[in-house]
Each structure stands twice: as C-alpha cells, then as structure tokens.
Image (cartoon, helix red, strand yellow):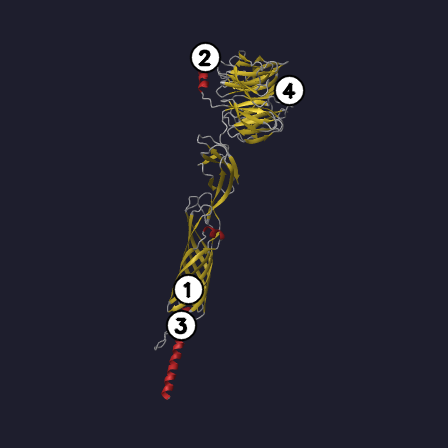
Amino acid sequence: MYYLGRFVTALLAGSLIQQGFADQGPFYKASTKKAPSEKSPLECPTLEAKLGYFMFVDSEMREIFNHGGIDAELSTSYPLKRHLQIYASVEYQRKSGRAENGGEKTTFWAVPLSLGLKPVATFSSYAQGYFTIGPRYVFAHVHNDSSFVDRNLSHNGIGGFANVGLNFFPMRHFLIDLFAEYSYVRMHFHPHKTNVYAESRQVGGFVFGGGLGYVF
Amino acid sequence: MFRDLFRVGLLFLVLARPCFGDFAYIVNEESPGTVSVLNTSSNTIIATVTVGNNPNADAITPNGMFVYVTNSTDNSVSVFNAASLQVIATIALSGSPTAIAMAPNGNTVYVGDSSGQLYAISTSSNTIISTPLAPPASSVSSLAVSPDNAGLYVGYPGLSKFESFALNPDGTFSAGGVSFPDNRPQVMTSATTPGGGQFVFSGAIAGGAGGALEVIDVKAPPNPTFNQIIATVTVGSVPNGIAVSPNGEFIYISNDFASKYINVINTSNFNTFVATITNPPTGIDGPTAFTANGLTAYVLNFSTTGLVNVIDTNQSSPTYNTVIATVTVDPNFNDIAMGTVAPSSISAPSNLTGKQKKHDFGVVYELFNLLEWGPVSTGTAAGFNIYRDGILIATVGPTTFKYKDHDRKKGVANTYQVTAVTSSGTESSPATITIP
C-alpha cells in the first residue's frame, strides 16, 4: 500500500510537471534537464516574407486597374519593450490594367518602404495579435503601351500605412502571419509629352495576405 | 500684223482651253427666292438653290467656289457653296440691296443698297469689313471694281452720276469718293483689254430714252487719263446688261425697251461696232454672262419671260454672234453669273456627332475628339476626308464611320468638317461640328 501510494504520487507529480512545461508554449521543452531560460516571442526579433493581394481604393484607379495585383513584402520587427516593437518593411507591388477609352495596357509598380510602431497583444503562447502604424515612402513607376502619352513615368511620394494581423507560432522559431493593410500615398505624376495631363491620385490601397517568418 | 498675230494667239489660247462645263447661276426674284443652276454643256437646269426672299443680283468668286446673292426683301446676302449647293452664310445688311460686284482678286465682294449705302464683305470671313458711309439717299444701280482692285465704281442713276472710291489693300473703302456727273448709269463692268488697258464700262441712259456706253479709263497713274471718261458711245435705248468677253476684246451691251438687241463693241476702238445681235421676233436683252472659254454667252431675255438666249461668240464659227439656242428657265429671273465648279454628285455624310473624351491611363491622360457619322444619302463614297479648323487631317475608307483626333489641348475648341469623296475625286459638301 505504501509503495503503491508513492508510485501514484510520483506519477501525479510527473504529470503535473509535464503539464506545466506544455502551458509555456513551443519555446519550453519537456526535459529532464533544467529548462533553459527561453524568451517570449514578444521579446524576439522576427523576419518575415509576405505575399498579398493588392487593390487600389481610388475609384478612377480601380476603373483602369480593375483586377487585383500582387504585393510581395519583406518585413522585420524588433522589440522595444515587452508589448511594443519597431517595424520596417520593403514591398513590391505590381498591377496591370487597360486605359479607359483606348484599351491599351498600362502597368503600375511601386516599392513602398515602411517604418512603424507595432503594439503587440498576446492571446496565448501560440498566438498574438498586432497593429502597426507609421509613415511610408513610395517609389512608383508606370509603363503605358501607347504613343499618345508618356510610355514611362516615375514618381515618389510620402504617405502612411496601418496594418493589423495575427501571428501564430506552431513550432519553435517559426511563425505564420495573417494580415490586412491599408496605405495612403497621394502622387501627382508629371508627364513630359505635350497635351498630356495628370491628376493627383491616391496610389495606396488595401493588401490582404499572409506570410511566413522566423523568430530569432 | 503683230496685233493680228496677237489676236490669233489669244484666240488659239481661248480655243485650246478645255471646256469644263460652265455653270450659270440664274437668280429668280420670288419668295422664297431661288437660284437656278444651268449646265451649259447640256443647257439644262440641274439644280435649284433656295436663298433669301426676292433675290435680285448675284456674283461669283473667281475660283467659282462661292456664289453671293443679294436678297432685296430680307436686306441680306446669301452665300452658297457652288459644289455642295449649300448656303453657308447669310450676311445682314442695313438696307435693301440693289447691286453687287466681285473684286477681281476674289477677296472682297461689294454690295450697294437702295439708300446708296455701300458694303465691303470679306469672302474669307463672310463679314462686313467696311465702315458705313453717309449714304446719298439714292439707290445704287450698278457696281464695278477696277481690274487692279484699286477702285470701286458706283452708279447712282437717281443723281445722274457715278462715283469712284479708292480701295485699300484690305478691300475697304473710305468716304470721299470722286463724283462724275454723268448720265444715268444702269449697268457696269470692268475689264483688261488685250492692249493692257484697264477700263470700267458703264451702260447709262443718256437723256430721253437713249442709251450710252461710257468708257472710264481706270489704269493707275501715271496714266494721264486715269479716272476720266475717254469715250461715250451711243448704243440702244436702255442698257440693262453688260459683259466683256473673257479675252477682253468685245463688250456686249444689251438694250431694253425699244431696242431689244445687243451691241457688240470692239475694245480696241470703242467706236467700232462689231455686230448688233437681234433675235426676232422676241428680241434679246438683259444681263449677260460668258462661259470661261469665251465661246458662248448667255443672255436673260427680259423681253420674253423665262427665256435665256445662247449666243455663239466663237469668232471662227459660222454662227458667230447669233443666237444658237434658247433655254426655258424660271420666269422670275433677274440676274446671271457664270462659274466653273460642278455641283457635287455626292451628299454630305449624315448625322455627324462629336464628343471630347478622356484617354485615361490612371495617373496620366490625354484628350481626344471622337467623330462619328453615317453614310451618304446620294452617291457612293470611296472615302471620307476629315478636316480640323479647315485643314485636312485624315482620309478614311468608305466603311469607316468614326475617327479619333488625339492630342487635343484642354480648353481649346476645334471645328471639324467631314466630307464624302467619290472614286473620281468629287468631294461633297461638308458636315460640320464644333467640339468645345
């Protein structure tokens, strides 16, 4: 009876210890060795590659570029405090469309560079949510398959962005990101050809996508 | 001998010129007024153009493209295109017009009215370019422009005089004309004669009911007889038609009332009567016009309503200076002018519409004017010409009914004309639209 009681106690103790390690997420291994002092993901820099679907919000731009475009992004986050990170990203956006009242192909691509502050909220050891806001610099280029307007035009501008997302940590050093982003950048291109005109346009928009990242 | 050789040479040139089928524009004084277009090749009326009310005189530009018709009731001048037969302008006057004359250079047409007022009208803009004068309150019966476009001669039969006004290079005239006390001028014309002389010929009523041809020398100084009457020749009773053959050799002066015949006078010697053309039993009188080659003259026979006499004016013809044909026309005829432009056998494109559109590439755009039109109702189009502000910018095929004129400047209006063209090159009158 004595030995049965000690065996049961030992089993229960072991089970409790095991459960305790599990509650601490993928960064805590059940081990007979002493647990190393692992960091929370809130305290770890991350590097992500993201892919998204980009769409203009400007109605005139949507008439020309009426299908979605691709948005590819490399972003990084670095913790400043426990629930606040600094965020930086470089993107490449590309959309093709057809000129109104002509149908010629026109291609718009842009390289936004973003910098922001990223408050983070932890929901569990496997998931956290974030919100990022900050300024954005955009270099944009347009190519028009037409002799009636400038074939190639470039311009740059400064605006802002905000994104929200969820990070999931299914395993150590690995994260999955789902996000939605809005950007606002107003540009007024300057055509060189005579009798070609430009209007100020909001060339930002929405991006919906996901990414894979590494947690250092 | 040299003069004879010269005359033969001129005659050869006249005869060698191809006859393009001249067209006589006969004014019919009625309401609504009309102009009958007579094809001199067939001596048939081929078209009728509606103008203002009670038209009484006409003149045609030297290139034959535009006919100017004075409308006595409407106090206006109608302008129509000789090819399309479309009235393209109506010019308002301050009085009832009574006489019209085209400057030899075709830049200006002059009109006189029943109060004696004179008007200079630019044929490029179809607007009055002269400043009104103080009219002498006496009707203008006749007008003529000197062959060098430097003088305007105006007949005032009610004042028994004619006046000459110096013309500026832009066609305008100033007040202060030179008066010539005279008989009562009825008809006038001008010509350059083979010897290089420049004259205005005035058919006037000289006392009683006698007629006179007065010859005014208008060759510019240092000509010692400039602006002087150098000859007065007794002709028939009341001159009511006068024309000079295209080679400048002969004056044909028609005489009304008791005479009813045409005197033919040699310009080398104004006292030499070459012929007196009669046409028994109806007589022959009235306004006269020559075909471009000078081989035929058409005379409105005021003695018989609605009859045009055709006179053979070919010097080498056995029927020279005789009436060789008659043409029945509108009985209300009043004047005649001759041109060489054939009326178009194809109608203008139908339903021309135009709109400016934005060729939008998102961040940049350009503007274009879109023209659309329908098929012609008469004739077969081999293509269409598109003009912008009077300049030909494109020619498209017969199955193309739209055109995009790109690269338009913002805020600038353009006027477009679209014409249909036949396979032989005949062009229709234009369909016109202005896109702001």
Disc 1 designates what residue?
A177
Marking on residue A25: 3
Q: Amino acid at mark 4?
A: Gly
Instruction: Describe the element under mark 2 as helix, strand or loop.
Output: helix
Distance CA(mark 3)–CA(mark 4) = 123 Å
Subunit of label 2: B
Q: Are marks 4 and 1 on the same chain?
A: no
Q: Residue at x 48, y 23 (%)?
A: B21
Left or right: B396 as drawn, with respect to B72: left
Subunit of label 1: A
Q: Amino acid at mark 1?
A: Asp
Q: Residue furthest bottom?
A: A1
Disc 4 designates what residue?
B158
Distance CA(mark 3)–CA(mark 1) = 17 Å
Disc 2 designates what residue?
B4
Give the image location of residue B173, x and y in percent. Answer: 57, 25
Give the image location of residue B352, x and y in percent. Answer: 51, 38
Give the image location of residue B28, x and y in percent. Answer: 58, 25
Q: Are marks 4 and 2 on the same chain?
A: yes
Subunit of label 4: B
